[in-house]
Image (cartoon, grey):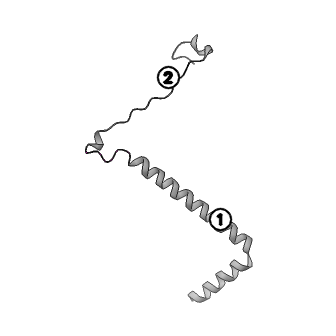
Amino acid sequence: MLKINLVLALRNIFRNKLYTAINIIGLGTASAFCILVYLHLKNEQSFDKFHNDADQLYRVEETGLNQPVAEDKKSKGFFRC
C-alpha cells in the first residue's frame, strides 16, 4: 500500500512540476517564518530569566522624551496635541 502511494505521489510530482515547485517553495517559506517567529518569541520571553529573583524584575522603557518639540506643538502646551 505504501509503495503504491509513493509511486502515485512521484508520478504527480513529475507530471505537475510547476505546481509542485510553487507548493514546496510556499511550504518552505511558511515553515521558515514560523520558526523565526517562534525563536523571536522565545528570546523575548527569556529576557532576564537568569537572575535569582527574575519574578521581581521590571523593565522601564522611555520613548521620545529627548526628541526636540516641533514649533507648532510648543504653543499648544506639553500634553495637548
Q: How many callouts does the rendering have?
A: 2
Q: Which comes sooner in the sequence, label 2 or label 1?
A: 1
Disc 1, SS: helix
Residue contact at pointers 2 and 1, CB within 8 angstroms: no
The picture quadrant where one finds residue 73 is top right
Span highlighted in magenta in the image: 47-52
Return the x and y of residue 31 as percentages of the image width and height. Answer: 56, 62
Residue at 43% x, 47% y: name it: 44
Query: What's the distance in space between the residues labelled 2 and 1, CA to CA?
Result: 46 Å
Query: Above or below — where is 48 with respect to 33?
Result: above
Disc 2, SS: loop
Residue in the foreground of this view, choosing between 65 and 34 = 65
Return the x and y of residue 70 as percentages of the image width and height. Answer: 60, 17
In front: label 2 or label 1: 2
Q: Which mark is residue 81?
A: none
Return the x and y of residue 64 as percentages of the image width and height. Answer: 51, 26
Q: Is residue 51 magenta?
A: yes
- Which amino acid type is marked by label 2? Asn
Q: Residue furthest left?
A: 52
- The quadrant of the rendering that contains the C terminus is top right
Residue at 61% x, 65% y: name it: 27
> Mark 1 = which residue?
25
Within 10 angstroms of label 1, few (less than 14), some, or many (20 or more) residues? few
> Mark 2 = which residue?
66
Query: Above or below — where is 53 with respect to 65?
Result: below
Q: Is residue 1 magenta?
A: no
Give left or right: position of 46 versus 22. left
Give left or right: position of 12 versus 62. right
- The quadrant of the rendering that contains the N terminus is bottom right
Residue in the foreground of this view, choosing between 60 and 68 = 68
